[in-house]
Image: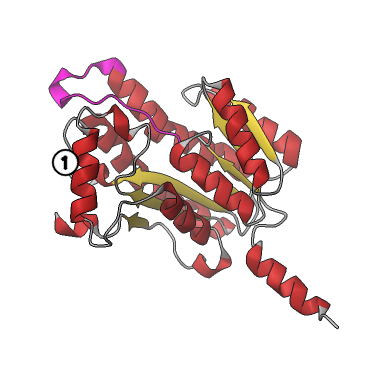
Amino acid sequence: MVDCRWEAELSDLNKPFSGKVALVTGGSQGIGLAIAQELARQGADIAFNYLRDHSKAKTAESSILEHGGRCLRVRAQLLDSEQIDSLMGAVEDEYGRLDILVNNAASGVQRPALELEERHWDWTLGINSRAPWLCAKKATRLMQSGSHIVNITSLGSERVLPHYAFVGISKAALQALTRYLAVELGPLGISVNAVSAGYIDTRALRTFENWNEILEHAEKMTPAGRLLTAEDVANLVAFLCTERATMIRGQVIVVDGGLSLLG
């Protein structure tokens, strides 16, 4: 006879986010989609925002649903605080709560710093730094003790990459925000951390003129012997949202197969 208690414990291990709700910004593609899929696989109900491509968002929604749970897709421009309000309102109306916020959405203009314009600064810092602050500020109203915020940053926040000035600056600001929020939200039982990802073959990386060379160099130099994948990042994000990671607070954790160790 099967021990029902054992079955329940096994289910808890396989679905640690059962009954919980996760919002992943920019969750219709790339790293964001991989994170949404992994959290869904581990039991979470998902919400994600997108901006332009309705077809891609619908495809992402279907793929998330295949991993289990429910899924809510919301079109929202994160530069607009009112649309962030609408996004959070949609999550509240659909689920009534929020347990996990992953600030993944990112954008930027790849040019030398002195060739960039003020509007590029406003756009890049608005999406990559201001929006995560606003999302966190508004999300905490729906969160309880035991909730988690994870910000997605990049190696360019701490090292100089070609044509990456404004993106690197915006990600450095996001890492500082991570530390401040970790201290402010700690008494509320909300953990805040950041994941700094290495090079991944995504549409975002392919906006670089030399993207092929970047990936070839990364694969050759990575001590782990292979390129990083979006799923590698998703696995780390999921871990940071479990009780096992409860004492990790305000940290920027690098996942890059060891590439950054070599300069």
Expressed as whole percent of the image width and height from the top left, the position of residue 89 reads 68, 31
Residue 252 relative to residue 186: left or right: left
Q: Which residue is mark 1?
A: 160
Q: Residue at x 16, y 26 (%)?
A: 113
Asked where in the image residue 128 lies, by quadrant, the reply is: top left
Rendered-image quadrant of the C terminus:
bottom left
Q: Secondary structure at mark 1?
A: loop
Q: Which residues are magenta?
A: 105-119
Rendered-image quadrant of the N terminus:
bottom right
Residue 122 relative to residue 247: left or right: left
The amino acid sitting under disc 1 is Val
Which is the main secondary structure of the residues drawn in magenta? Answer: loop
Q: Residue at x 19, y 60 (%)?
A: 261
Q: Is residue 83 magenta?
A: no
Q: Residue at x 62, y 53 (%)?
A: 41
Let me know if residue 163 appears in the view: yes
Relative height, residue 100 to residue 129 (above, below): below
Asked where in the image residue 221 lies, by quadrant, the reply is: bottom left
